[in-house]
Image: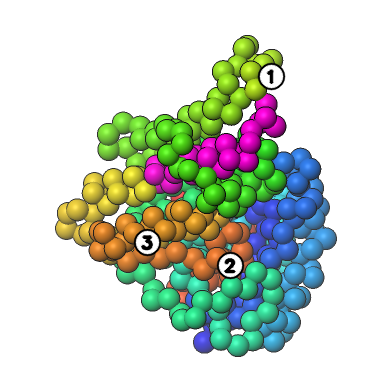
């Protein structure tokens, strides 16, 4: 039995968790900074790194306290060391190094994007879990079968992967402009919804008519597994504000979003959501057709990242799984958004292979995947 302490500070969540044997979460603490960034309607890197610095100590202490373990009882320290905001990553990486050195424990650097694909395999221990965001599924989910098709949908990334094993992934395609979560956040700004926009837009969409507006579904050239969301965002902007006179910062629009009725706002949100999720589902289907129709068809579909919390994406993914007879693995709601359990969980793979990092482990802004 192993217990790995995970640390995550890549963006605006300061998180620590303890995970047993790669899947069983015995502590899960997330300190969100949404309140600090709300008035800027986006993450301000300097504010994020300062807040991580203030919170990282108490967050790690709380996770260990909830797990009922001391530093001497953990088997390794794992940290998301890439990708992310460099000033934010450095805080987590430095904390992890300090603990590894002081407690004499192995250090494991984990790729945040890859870890999102592990989130669907996590489940809460039936006892002893404390911390924020607990939404306990009743049973441990069956682990995914490989090879699998993986989709990461977050605020910073939107990409499809062939997953041969939890730590063996190959990118098949990615967004050529906005990430889908970023498109949601920008759409929410256009509709004047509160920050952070994705979950608010999702909730509002449930009250609207998804056929009210026919927004574009950009599929790129036939066979492409890349994504593009900027056309959808612009189509929403024009539907809300009319066509602009002039360009860039000097553009003047015919209407303001403040003129929208509640009904119109909900219809726009529902139509945006229908188009965004259609694009994701269509690309999943294309990847299943193109890559896995041959000798090694995909045995599972794994989805991870903040947008995997989206109600329509979850429903459409389950429907696709039934239709195409493929197991669909979605994270429990607590593990969709950035968290440290996915970091500690994936690190177990490296632990089993005794693949450790030394104190030179760098914080890196870009993903290796
Ligand atoms: O994975 P995550 O916490 O951070 C990154 O690694 O980027 O994802 C955050 C993103 C944000 O863009 C947020 O608006 C989006 O996930 N998000 C959602 C929903 N919940 C979070 N987007 C659509 N529907 C949701 N329910
Ligand atoms: Zn993330």
| Residue 271 placement (x, y as % from top left) | 48, 39
Q: Which mark is residue 286?
A: none
Mark 2 → mark 3, Cα distance in angstroms: 18 Å
Pointer 3 residue: 318
Mark 2 Cβ and ligand 1 under 8 Å apart? no
CB-based contact (under 8 Å), mark 2 and mark 3: no
Numbered circles on residues, count: 3
Q: Secondary structure at mark 1?
A: helix
The residue segment tinted magenta is 256-280
Foreground of the two, 142 or 315 = 315
Foreground of the two, 369 or 241 = 241
Secondary structure that dominates the magenta span:
helix
Mark 2 → mark 1, Cα distance in angstroms: 39 Å
CB-based contact (under 8 Å), mark 3 and mark 1: no
Pointer 2 residue: 334
Q: Secondary structure at mark 2?
A: helix
Residue 270 part of the magenta-drawn span: yes
Mark 3 → mark 1, Cα distance in angstroms: 42 Å
Q: Please give the name of the residue rendered at 39% of the width and 44% of the height, measured from the top-left corner.
A: 278
Pointer 1 residue: 249
- 306 relative to 71, above or below: above
| Residue 41 placement (x, y as % from top left) | 72, 41
Foreground of the two, 90 or 266 = 266
Callout 2: 10 Å neighbours few (<14), some, many (20+)?
many
Q: Secondary structure at mark 3?
A: helix
In this rendering, position of residue 48 left or right of residue 323? right
| Residue 366 placement (x, y as % from top left) | 56, 46
Mark before the other along the chain sequence, 2 or 1: 1
Q: Quadrant of residue 257?
A: top right
Mark 3 Cβ and ligand 1 under 8 Å apart? no
Mark before the other along the chain sequence, 2 or 3: 3
Residue extending furthest toward the top? 246
């Amino acid at each position: 039995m192993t217990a790995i302490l995970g640390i995550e500070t890549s963006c605006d969540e300061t998180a620590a968790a303890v995970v047993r044997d790669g899947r069983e979460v015995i502590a899960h603490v997330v300190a969100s900074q949404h309140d600090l960034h709300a008035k800027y309607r986006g993450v301000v890197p300097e504010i994020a790194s300062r807040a991580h610095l203030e919170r990282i100590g108490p967050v790690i202490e709380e996770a260990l306290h909830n797990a009922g373990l001391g530093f001497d009882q953990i088997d390794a320290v794992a940290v998301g060391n890439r990708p992310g905001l460099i000033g934010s990553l450095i805080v987590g990486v430095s904390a992890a190094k300090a603990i590894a050195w002081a407690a004499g424990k192995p250090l494991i650097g984990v790729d945040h994007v890859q870890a999102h694909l592990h989130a669907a395999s996590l489940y809460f221990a039936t006892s002893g879990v404390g911390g924020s965001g607990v939404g306990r599924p009743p049973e441990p989910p069956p682990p995914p079968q490989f090879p699998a098709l993986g989709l990461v949908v977050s605020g910073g990334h939107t990409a499809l992967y062939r997953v041969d094993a939890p730590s063996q992934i190959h990118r098949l395609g990615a967004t050529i402009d906005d990430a889908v979560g970023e498109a949601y956040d920008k759409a929410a700004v256009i509709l004047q919804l509160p920050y952070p926009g994705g979950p608010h837009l999702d909730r509002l969409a449930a009250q609207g008519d998804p056929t009210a507006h026919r927004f574009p579904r950009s599929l790129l050239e036939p066979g492409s597994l890349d994504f593009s969301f900027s056309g959808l965002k612009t189509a929403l902007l024009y539907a809300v504000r009319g066509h602009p006179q002039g360009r860039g910062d000097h553009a003047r629009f015919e209407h303001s979003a403040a003129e929208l009725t509640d009904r119109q706002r909900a219809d726009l949100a529902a139509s945006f959501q229908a188009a965004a999720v259609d694009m994701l589902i269509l690309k999943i289907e294309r990847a299943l057709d193109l890559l896995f129709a041959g000798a090694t068809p995909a045995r599972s579909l794994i989805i991870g990242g903040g947008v995997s919390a989206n109600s329509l994406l979850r429903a459409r993914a389950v429907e696709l799984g039934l239709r195409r007879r493929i197991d669909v693995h979605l994270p429990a709601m607590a593990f969709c958004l950035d968290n440290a359990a996915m970091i500690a969980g994936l690190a177990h793979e490296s632990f089993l292979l005794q693949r450790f990092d030394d104190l030179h482990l760098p914080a890196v802004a870009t993903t290796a995947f």
